[in-house]
Image (tube, helix red, strand yellow):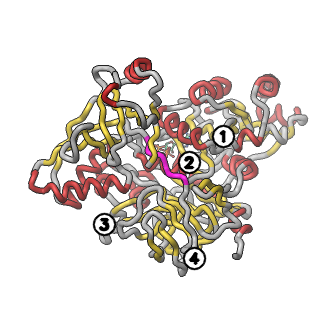
Amino acid sequence: METYADEINKRRTFAIISHPDAGKTTLTEKFLLYGGAINLAGSVKGKATARHAVSDWMAIEKERGISVTSSVLQFSYDGFCINILDTPGHQDFSEDTYRTLMAADSAVMVIDASKGVEAQTRKLFKVCVMRHIPIFTFINKMDRDANDTFELLDDIEKELGIATCPINWPIGSGKNFKGVYERESRCVITYSDTEKGTKEGHATRIPMEDKEALTAQIGEDFLSQLTDEIELLDGASAAYDLEEIQAGELTPVFFGSALTNFGVEIFLQHFLKMTTAPLPRKADVGLIDPASHDFSAFVFKIQANMNKAHRDRIAFMRICSGRFDVNKEVRHVQGGRVLRLSQPQQIMADERKILSEAYAGDIIGVFDPGIFSIGDTVCMPGEQFVYEGIPTFAPEHFARVRQVDTMKRKQFVKGIMQIAQEGAIQIFQEFNTGMEEIIVGVVGVLQFDVLKYRLENEYNVEIKLENLPYEYIRWIENKDIDLDKLTGTSDMKKIKDLKDNPLLLFVNQWSIGMTLDRNEGLILSEFGQA
Ligand code: G4P
């Protein structure tokens, strides 16, 4: 077979994560500015207006002015082909946000310098750690008054439990932001408030040895503070270790200001040096090598009705090996069928581009006539293997679903099953009954509204949701445990998923601890297997 090592080696696929408002969108715009994808920053998602163009597929998005879906952007820079997987930037994010991380080879975490680590970052970070993917930290908004730099690093280490290794170091912040010191080159890169939307133009590099030029640029006080801080940093911070970075055990930290386009290109350059092309991925037959193996991919996300006019459903796949060729047939392993993927497309910021080829590392969206499920494997017709499944992430909100018109039982079950198959919601049942009592679990509360809206609009079924007080769900790992003998707390609830796997719902962490204490040998897990 032909190999496409050159194309694949150019690929870098990362997800960008942050708490809303930390500057993820702005940073993404600036990345694209350096590549060939778009010419003017601002056209990715210009907030209220253009943002809708990105994923204008649902009225809820429009009404609330938020982005429920996520998109994929591709751009080229310095000979690399870079895929950015954007994640929904609203508090009410969904499981899709988590799943996007399953398709990325690394993650860029954007943190607001005046806020430090925030709730949403913490959750997403956990998934990155579970996957051992490299995490790069960009501390943004240095043009505004920032927290103390050492405290920011301390915050990351304490809150997220990962060692930090600053690649550059800020000099002042806010009105007094003077630039950054790049540790590798031992140079100060001076800050200039470049115009929004233009490339870094006026920044100058001054070696630390050139005290005269530095004093003139940043002033004596800042120079003396910087000299002290560098000494402290070199003595106290974790040493740069590429292996640890690539194993997700050490996060390189960068400081900058996405809005004024400072530190973005420095970030890109270091990032590209530290990341790898797509790595082999685990399947039931062993590791599949991206470059020497024929085409294979797995489905990490399914999205319905992206375009109202077509009522279509798109399956997003991450290509894990080889080259995707639109004219070739492939095997959908779980469906047991050989088929041609139709309308393969790349979902760009505001348009869908039909493509004829793509390589390991790329993400494609294909038309799905309702056959794909999250985690499915696609490979060449002569092959038969499955990639390791995507975990089911623990929902944090639960509600009992009641149908208003019980005559429409069939539509209701069909609708709710389909929506669950897409992965927007998870459905559970009471432990001792069947489908007559359905409990829905979601990662973000917005998904409740999405469920209600879609059942009404697509399946003509009206529902009522009764919120339940539980916030924690745990899968029971020991299959041999006698569930009738399980003694939990009085507020614990036993339920089961559609495959009859038993699960426990809890109102707080304390109850989980008590239940573990009371049942020797019980193993509970936060992630289930889809
Ligand atoms: P998000 O995708 O993470 O939610 O954040 P987004 O980029 O939309 O940025 C949130 C707000 O923070 C925006 O302001 C944006 O302009 C601002 N911002 C982003 N990076 C920087 C930075 O480096 N410095 C400063 N000072 N501000 C930054 P907004 O007023 O909410 O929107 P807009 O009217 O500017 O678009």
Amino acid under label 2?
Ile
Q: Nearer the viewer, residue 292 or 124?
A: 292
Q: Which residue is mark 2?
A: 16
Which of the marked residues, 1 or 3, is nearer the chain's N terminus? 1
Q: Is residue 243 left or right of residue 383?
A: right
Label 1 – label 2 distance at C-alpha: 15 Å
Label 3 – label 4 distance at C-alpha: 28 Å
Amino acid under label 4?
Asp
For the point 45% across and 75% down, the residue is 342
Q: Nearer the viewer, mark 2 or mark 4?
A: 4
Quick one: SS at disc 1?
loop
Q: Is residue 301 above or below residue 138?
A: below
Q: Is residue 356 left or right of residue 185?
A: left
Q: Which residue is mark 3?
A: 308
Q: Nearer the viewer, mark 1 or mark 2?
A: 1
Label 2 – label 4 distance at C-alpha: 28 Å
Q: Nearer the viewer, residue 208 or 65?
A: 65
Q: Quadrant of the N terminus?
A: bottom right
